[in-house]
């Protein structure tokens, strides 16, 4: 970008210098030459202002586009993270329920064995 700016500035300066020399060397009255130079310089200034405004607008648009793309990507990532969070919570709940069910089954099995063993001992003591 800086190289392009230097080239454009050099072209504008060269054009202005060439035009000024051409007007100064032309066989016209001094006032006419000065008016012509003033008009030409005003035209150059207007062209430079327009170019600067155009470049400024392009930079603003580019900045807005970059911001919008970054915002869009971030929103997508945030949505994905939220989906992963929900999936992880669901998986954790499912595993917790499975562990609770297994613990309950083990408890009931142990309780049944304990009752059976207690009944066997009770019957064995009563039959002795």
Image (spheres, helix red, strand yellow):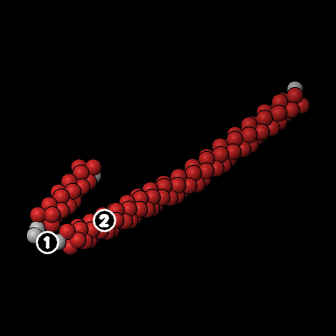
Q: Quadrant of residue 52?
A: bottom left
Question: Is label 2 or label 1 in front?
Answer: 1
Residue 59, image x and y in percent? 37, 60
Residue 66, image x and y in percent? 41, 58
State whether residue 11 is above or below residue 124: below
Residue extending farthest right? 126
Q: Quadrant of residue 38?
A: bottom left
- Quarter of the figure that contains the C terminus: top right
Q: Residue at x 56, y 55 (%)?
A: 82
* Mark closest to the chain's N terminus, 2 or 1: 1
Q: 12 or 60, which is in the foreground? A: 12
Q: Residue at x 31, y 65 (%)?
A: 45
Q: 58 or 114, which is in the foreground? A: 58
State whether residue 12 is above or below residue 35: above
For marks 2 and 1, give the CA distance. Answer: 24 Å
Label 1 packing within 10 angstroms: few (<14), some (14-19), many (20+): few
Q: Is residue 91 visible?
A: no
Label 2 packing within 10 angstroms: few (<14), some (14-19), many (20+): few
Name the residue that disc number 2 marks.
45
Q: Residue at x 83, y 30 (%)?
A: 121
State whether residue 3 is above or below residue 64: above
Name the residue that disc number 1 marks.
28
Q: Is residue 124 visible?
A: yes
Residue 22 shown left or right of residue 118 in the figure: left
Residue 40, image x and y in percent? 24, 69
Q: Residue at x 41, y 59 (%)?
A: 63
């Amino acid at each position: 970008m800086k190289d392009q700016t230097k080239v454009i500035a050099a072209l504008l300066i060269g054009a202005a210098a060439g035009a000024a020399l051409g007007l100064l060397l032309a066989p016209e009255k001094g006032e006419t030459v000065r008016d012509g130079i003033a008009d030409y310089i005003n035209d150059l200034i207007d062209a430079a202002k327009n170019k600067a405004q155009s470049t400024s607008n392009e930079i603003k648009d580019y900045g807005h586009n970059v911001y919008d793309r970054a915002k869009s990507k971030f929103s997508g990532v945030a949505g994905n993270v939220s989906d992963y969070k929900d999936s992880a919570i669901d998986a954790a709940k499912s595993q917790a329920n499975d562990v609770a069910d297994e613990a309950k089954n083990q408890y009931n099995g142990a309780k049944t064995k304990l009752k059976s063993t207690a009944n066997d001992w009770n019957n064995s003591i009563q039959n002795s």
